[in-house]
Amino acid sequence: MTKICETFEETTDFLSNRTPEKEKIVTALFFEFLDCFSSLGAEKLEYPKEFQNDVKLYLQGHTILKKKFEDVEIRYLMLSDFYDFCRLTKRYMK
């Protein structure tokens, strides 16, 4: 998860300065987050239910969530929430 947070920091201005390169970073991080989060054992229960449910349903192919996360801005916002959560809970520190 640390690598995801470190790489996410390269995109903190994504919404105000969106570039194709940053879109690629956000998309790659989103799928890395899905893989990483889904592989967590009991630790994932320490994360908000929103992460748990969205990842689970997305990976199950839930049509509405798949459509929702086609939007790179929505992917970015989820990663931003994850990053903020990690910082607030001291799971990640600069």
Image: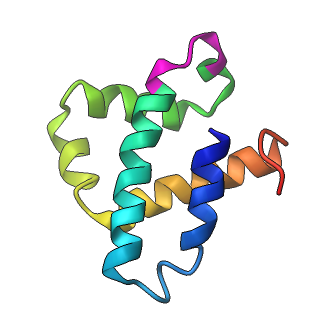
Residue range of the region highlighted in magenta in the rendering:
38-43
Furthest residue in direction bottom, as rendered: 17
Residue 41 occupies quadrant: top right
What secondary structure predominates along the stretch shown in magenta?
A: helix
Furthest residue in direction left, as rendered: 63
> In the rendered image, which quarter contains the N terminus?
top right
Residue at point 47%, 81% (across, down): 15
Tag count: 0
Q: Is residue 18 left or right of residue 5?
A: left
Residue at point 32%, 65% (across, down): 72
Q: Using the image as rendered, state which of residue 67 and residue 8 is in the foreground.
A: 8
Residue 92 position within the rendered picture, expressed as x and y whole percent measured from the top left: 77, 45
Above or below, comparing residue 54 to residue 72 in the picture? above
Residue 93 position within the rendered picture, expressed as x and y whole percent measured from the top left: 83, 51
Residue 6 position within the rendered picture, expressed as x and y whole percent measured from the top left: 65, 56
> In the rendered image, which quarter contains the C terminus?
bottom right
Q: Is residue 61 left or right of residue 38?
A: left
Q: Using the image as rendered, state which of residue 12 and residue 55 is in the foreground.
A: 12
Residue at point 55%, 19% (across, down): 40
Magenta residue check for 60:
no
> How was the colour assigned to the protein in this rendering?
rainbow
Residue at point 33%, 65% (across, down): 24
Furthest residue in direction top, as rendered: 42
Residue 22 position within the rendered picture, expressed as x and y whole percent measured from the top left: 41, 73
Q: Using the image as rendered, state which of residue 79 and residue 19 is in the foreground.
A: 19
